[in-house]
Amino acid sequence: MPASTGGIIGGGPRPCNSGLPGNEPLTKAEAVLNSPHFPLLETTLSGPRPLIAGNWKMNAGDAAGIALARAVIEGAGSETLGCDLLLCPPAVILAEVARLAGGSAAAVGGQDCHAEDAGAHTGDLSAIMLREAGASFVIVGHSERRAGHGETDAMVRAKAEAAHRAGLTAIVCIGETEGERAAGKTLDVLAHQVGGSVPAGAGAADTVIAYEPVWAIGSGRTPSPGEVAEAHAHIRARLAGRVDSAAEVRILYGGSVKPDNAGAILALGDVNGALIGGASLDAAAFLAIARLCR
Ligand code: 13P
């Protein structure tokens, strides 16, 4: 357990800056955590370096994507950010984006991989291929793949294991549907997904969790800070019995993260970055979010 420097401030490792003028991050986090929506949790200022990741989905797979990558990499190049950056472009430009990102602060990731290392799987990509193209991360189990491609927790876990075999960090996505939240099942769903999707033996070095409420993705709606903090604290508690160094595992929030709401979310103690869809297609917006982690 790292040395505490801040006493009771929130539910996890180092939070990002709130970005509010004249309002230090701890003050912000403390204010949020003192709200009646969730309990105070003991934590420290130490913890994993935040990760700000852009999931471009099926967008910008052409010259516009190369320009976007260049704008992010060059924009970040002249400053010292308080976070790691990750770009997850469409696979057809991943190698070129990785070449551009070489030597920069930005890493590159795939958006999905097959659970096997090679074989007769038309249209699929293996984690090894992504690695050879320059990726160091891969997203697995995004809700769009769970819903659109029938991916189960077991399939997601097998993909994360393939990522680990290839030396990639797996970003394992979990999150409840709107109906599950309305039925009061959010925490049970998250516990079930952590148990089913995260490989036993995973750890902070090879696994990131992304909490993405399905109903918040692309909708412009987000859970309250209290609801995000509750979910993240619950995920970390579930990881504790399952992975190595659970306190150091980065847990990202995803779902309608924008520059104007990111500060409040990233200031929460157990939030170690963000997985960003729409706003990651705009270099200025993506970098504005990253700068909140300064
Ligand atoms: P939006 O930021 O567009 O809501 O997308 C979130 C997401 O699905 C990232 O993986």
Image (cartoon, rainbow, N blue to C red):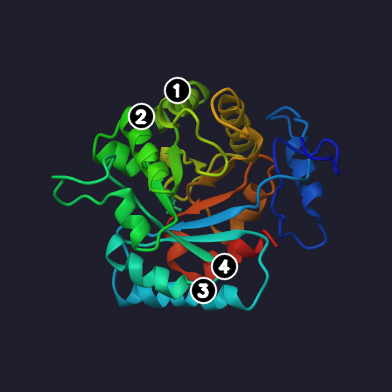
Q: Secondary structure at mark 2?
A: helix
- Left or right of residue 94, residue 17 in this image: right
Seen at 33% across and 49% down, the residue is: 127
Seen at 45% across and 56% down, the residue is: 136
Name the residue carrying label 3.
73
- The reply to whether callout 4 and callout 3 are in contact (CB within 8 Å) is yes
- Is label 2 or label 4 in front? 4
Distance CA(mark 2)–CA(mark 1): 9 Å
The amino acid type of the residue labelled 1 equals His
Label 2 neighbourhood size at 10 Å, few (<14), some (14-19), many (20+)? some
- Is label 4 or label 3 in front? 4
The amino acid type of the residue labelled 3 equals Ile
Q: Earlier in the sequence, mark 4 or mark 3?
A: 3
Name the residue carrying label 4.
105
Q: Secondary structure at mark 1?
A: helix
Tell me if residue 190 comes above or below residue 160 in the rendering.
above
Can residue 65 be seen in this snapshot? yes
Can residue 57 be seen in this snapshot? no
Q: Earlier in the sequence, mark 2 or mark 4?
A: 4
- The reply to whether callout 2 and callout 1 are in contact (CB within 8 Å) is yes
Name the residue carrying label 1.
192
Q: Nearer the viewer, residue 169 or 196?
A: 169
- Which numbered tag is attached to residue 153? 2
